[in-house]
Image: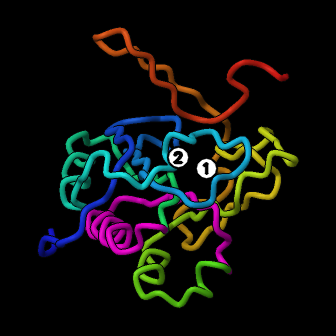
């Protein structure tokens, strides 16, 4: 692994193994902090920028590599690009370790590029699939995998995946030893309103 970075990720939740957040078995990191506050957001608990669980990019990749089934890492939010330096470090380490990368953002690709921030450029260079665009409640649509509104785009920044690799929506329900229930994935969880 590369030399240790000095930045940490503010993490809302880390899931070392999931089959519901992209192609194949993946690790998934929900970053904490989002200033966008989309109406109808699926995860408003990720909005606060208060530190929640601090993880180094190295620790995140080490945890991801513990299970040999993991082929990649998916980054969600919050808004990942509000933590550009640790995000860039995490994605760079993922690539060094031959993990594929899927990143969700409420910004468009064009908005990210226009920021002209070197860490954002580095993050984008180490992203296989960028799923971009804000959640728009007026365009709510679960007909495509992983996204909730019609405006959101799948941008294949490398040739590692195609849309065929994103075949369907999946939802995972996990029950902890203490009885807590955690959901992840995307789709109509409770039927249409």
Mark 1 or mark 2: name the one nearer the start of the chain. 2
Magenta segment: 82-110
Residue 119 image position (x, y, % from top left): 40, 81
Q: Secondary structure at mark 2?
A: loop
Q: Nearer the viewer, residue 141 or 22?
A: 141
Q: Secondary structure at mark 1?
A: helix
User: Toward which corner of the image does residue 123 lie, by quadrant?
Assistant: bottom left
Q: Is residue 34 magenta?
A: no
Residue at (49, 68) in percent of width and height: 81
Neighbours of disc 1 within 10 Å: few (<14), some (14-19), many (20+): few
Task: Look at the image and tell me in which quarter the C terminus lies.
Answer: top right
Q: Label 1 to label 2, Cα distance in Å?
A: 6 Å
Q: Relative to residue 163, is residue 171 depicted above or below?
A: above
Task: Look at the image and tell me in which quarter the N terminus lies.
Answer: bottom left
Q: Nearer the viewer, residue 129 or 105?
A: 105
Label 2 sits on residue:
23
Residue 21 image position (x, y, % from top left): 52, 42
Answer yes or no: do the residues labelled 1 and 2 have beta carbons within 8 Å? yes
Residue 136 image position (x, y, % from top left): 79, 51
């Amino acid at each position: 692994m590369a030399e240790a970075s000095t930045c940490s990720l503010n993490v809302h939740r880390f899931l070392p193994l999931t089959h519901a957040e992209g192609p194949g078995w993946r690790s998934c990191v929900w970053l904490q902090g989002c200033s966008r506050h989309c109406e109808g957001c699926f995860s408003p608990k990720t909005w606060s920028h208060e530190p929640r669980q601090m993880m180094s990019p190295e620790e995140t990749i080490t945890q991801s590599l513990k299970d040999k089934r993991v082929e990649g890492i998916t980054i969600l939010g919050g808004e990942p690009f509000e933590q550009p330096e640790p995000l860039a470090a995490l994605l760079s380490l993922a690539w060094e370790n031959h993990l594929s990368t899927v990143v969700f953002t409420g910004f468009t690709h064009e908005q990210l590029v226009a920021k002209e921030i070197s860490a954002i450029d580095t993050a984008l260079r180490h992203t296989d699939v960028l799923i971009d665009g804000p959640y728009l409640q007026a365009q709510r649509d679960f007909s495509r995998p992983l996204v909730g509104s019609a405006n959101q785009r799948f941008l294949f920044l490398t040739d590692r995946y195609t849309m065929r690799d994103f075949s369907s929506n999946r939802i995972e329900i996990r029950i902890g030893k203490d009885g807590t229930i955690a959901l992840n994935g995307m789709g109509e969880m409770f039927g249409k309103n």
